[in-house]
């Protein structure tokens, strides 16, 4: 380890202490959350009418990094709540704005230090000024590819956009609507579609959360309808602020906008709305709200999950609930429900929940191959020969061409942060080993194993090795060892198989193997990966305590990523409610 890298790592504890001591964190919790949700809103939607300043990719990253700030947020005093969002936010004085900036950057730093420990960066400099870079070009290229695969597998919320007249002219004056905000949630609930491939079956969902998959999807849809409605009204307030002639009117509309992007509302009202939309009973709704609510000890936040609901008791003893609509949309994913189970109920996760994740992944993969009825599919086929044994997670054989495809599937929780990536790489290594075992057999041995599993004589079949993951694969430690193995996630497999069968009416395995590689390359080219230089400045405000870290930041074309998510995610059968 370089002296500069060790010097920087040695400063981590002091940086943690300096952030924990920020006077900003002495403010009431609502004040801090309102300010943070303002950052979220500006990143996701920009700062004004027709603004091109929106940076949604950075907004999504910041929302995930809020998970690192949760332990600090819950230490803020709950009282006073304040009379309004503007009243709560007014406590963020000009002197505290730099501290808010520090807190935002601290979330990134919390992600960065574990990555440095795992050798993702080399560090140069010293004396409080450090420059981070990738140790070699191959590591940079692997990150581009892995981030791309992760991004195209992120769930999407698709909504049939109402007529523009329904989404605008909602506010008559600050605090008063014309009633469209009452109609919009029902409309969005009826038309909302979430493109998120299921992680579990009903049994796994019951073990993880005490609900069925259908009940979770109804909750997820209701939450999305709530969030989209609040974002529409916030946008309406923003348009009115931009049109305002008088400065005083502009301030009123901006204050109104704050009430919609950082709302604090009656918990009974919000719970009632979610129950009415979803049709869930009180007990079922309560189980799901519990998973997605930040507790007083900071749980269950962590590793990319920031619980979007926050409960308060106001000065009059009423139950109140606060949220950011953007955070609601991003955080109420199946991934996070499974993640919470893995932290709260380790034994249940290990013994019941995680066991369903690989079969669920294989179900989705098998559906792609069943496009061609001539293909022979064998699931979870064990084999042994000459002292070597293994299991085909999925064996696909085409008797027309005497060609097979050997898939090994690994389905851990989609990773966020260096620790989860390291565990992911362990699972990938397992997949490599299982593929290698069959590949190590001689020709007669392969013929024997394939013939026994397929129930017919096989002679010198060509076999493609495929490692199937739910999202991404890891760092260059994995990508540097890929060799002849074909890496794929469900989006790549769906896109390639659909394209081939649509063009030829059958799914030729050699063509699929080739297309998986070329599609991956095309997506990367379309995403236009570019690296910009970022600077994180943190620490006590004195000559010795303040440090700066200059580092490379990856940017992908958000339009290309959105298009890829839309075209490559299987459109599974849906139920309308």
Image (cartoon, helix red, strand yellow):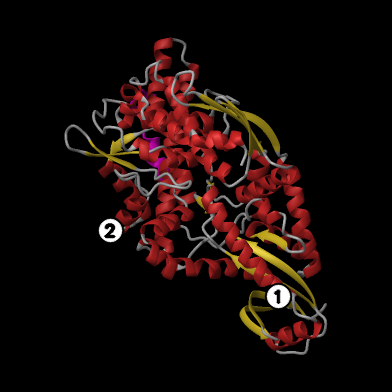
Q: Which residue is mark 1?
A: 396
- Graded by Cα atoms within 10 Å as few (under 14), some (14 to 19) or many (20 or more), the crowding at tag 2 reads few
Q: Residue furthest top?
A: 246
**The magenta stretch spans residue 169:** yes
Q: Which element carries disc 1, helix, strand or loop?
A: strand
Seen in the picture, residue 246 relative to 488 is either above or below; the reply is above
Q: Give residue 260's position: percent from left, percent from top.
A: 39, 32
Residue at the spot 32% in from the left edge and 52% down from the top edge: 290
Locate residue 212 relative to residue 575 in the image: left or right.
Answer: left
Answer whether residue 553 is magenta in the image.
no
Nearer the observer, 105 or 339: 105
Q: Which residue carries the number 2 mark?
A: 283
Magenta residues (range): 168-185
Q: Which secondary structure, mark 2?
A: helix
Residue 557 at x, y percent in the picture: 67, 38
Relative to residue 291, is residue 553 drawn left or right? right
Q: 216 and 439: which one is in front?
A: 439
Task: Identify which residue is drawn at 56% across, 37% down.
Answer: 6
Gap in Å between the C-alphas at discs 1 and 2? Answer: 44 Å
Residue in view at x 69 percent, y 41 percent = 135
Q: Is residue 159 visible?
A: yes
């Amino acid at each position: 380890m370089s002296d500069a890298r060790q010097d920087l790592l040695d400063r981590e504890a002091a940086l943690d202490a300096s952030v924990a001591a920020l006077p900003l964190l002495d403010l009431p919790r609502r004040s801090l959350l309102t300010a943070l949700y303002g950052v979220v809103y500006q990143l996701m939607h920009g700062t004004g009418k027709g603004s091109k300043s929106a940076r949604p990719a950075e907004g999504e990253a910041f929302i995930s990094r809020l998970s690192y700030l949760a332990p600090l947020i819950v230490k803020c005093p709950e009282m006073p709540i304040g009379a309004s969002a503007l009243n709560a936010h007014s406590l963020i004085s000009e002197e505290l704005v730099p501290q808010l900036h520090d807190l935002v950057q601290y979330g990134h730093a919390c992600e960065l230090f574990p990555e440095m420990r795992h050798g993702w960066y080399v560090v140069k400099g010293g004396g409080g000024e450090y420059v981070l870079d990738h140790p070699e070009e191959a590591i940079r290229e692997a990150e581009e590819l892995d981030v791309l695969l992760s991004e195209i597998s992120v769930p999407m919320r698709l909504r049939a956009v109402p007529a523009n007249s329904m989404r605008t002219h909602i506010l008559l004056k600050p605090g008063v609507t014309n009633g469209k905000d009452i109609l919009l949630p029902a409309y969005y609930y009826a038309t909302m579609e979430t493109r998120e491939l299921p992680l579990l079956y009903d049994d796994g969902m019951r073990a993880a959360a005490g609900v069925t998959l259908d009940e979770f999807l109804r909750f997820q849809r209701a939450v999305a309808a709530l969030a989209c409605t609040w974002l529409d009204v916030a946008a309406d307030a923003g348009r009115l602020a931009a049109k305002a002639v008088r400065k005083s009117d502009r301030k009123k509309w901006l204050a109104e906008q704050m009430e919609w992007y950082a709302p604090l509302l009656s918990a009974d009202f919000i719970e009632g709305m979610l129950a009415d939309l979803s049709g869930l009973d009180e007990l079922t709704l309560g189980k799901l709200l519990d998973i997605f609510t930040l507790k007083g000890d900071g749980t269950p936040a962590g590793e990319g999950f920031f619980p979007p609901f926050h409960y308060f008791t106001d000065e009059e003893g009423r139950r109140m609930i606060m949220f950011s609509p953007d955070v609601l949309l991003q955080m109420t994913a199946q991934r996070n429900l499974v993640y919470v189970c893995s932290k709260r109920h380790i034994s249940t996760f290990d013994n019941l929940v995680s066991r369903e994740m690989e079969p669920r992944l294989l179900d989705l993969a098998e559906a792609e191959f069943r496009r061609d009825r001539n293909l022979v599919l064998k699931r979870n086929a064990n084999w042994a020969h000459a002292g070597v044994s293994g299991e085909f997670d999925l064996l696909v054989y085409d008797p027309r061409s005497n060609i097979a495809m050997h898939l090994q599937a690994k389905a851990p929780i989609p990773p966020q942060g260096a620790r989860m990536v390291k565990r992911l790489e362990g699972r990938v290594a397992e997949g490599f080993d299982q593929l290698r075992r069959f590949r190590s057999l001689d020709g007669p041995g392969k013929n024997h194993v394939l013939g026994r599993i397929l129930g017919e004589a096989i002679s010198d079949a060509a076999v493609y090795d495929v490692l199937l993951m739910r999202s991404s694969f890891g760092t260059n430690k994995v990508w540097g060892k890929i060799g002849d193995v074909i890496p794929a996630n469900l989006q790549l497999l769906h896109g390639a198989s659909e394209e081939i069968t649509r063009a030829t009416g059958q799914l030729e395995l050699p063509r699929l193997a080739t297309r998986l590689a070329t599609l991956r390359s095309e997506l990367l080219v379309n995403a236009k990966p570019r690296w910009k230089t970022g600077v994180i400045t943190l620490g006590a405000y004195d000559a010795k305590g303040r440090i700066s870290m200059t580092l490379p930041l990856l940017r992908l074309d958000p339009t290309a990523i959105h298009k890829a998510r839309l075209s490559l995610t299987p459109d599974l059968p849906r139920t309308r409610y």
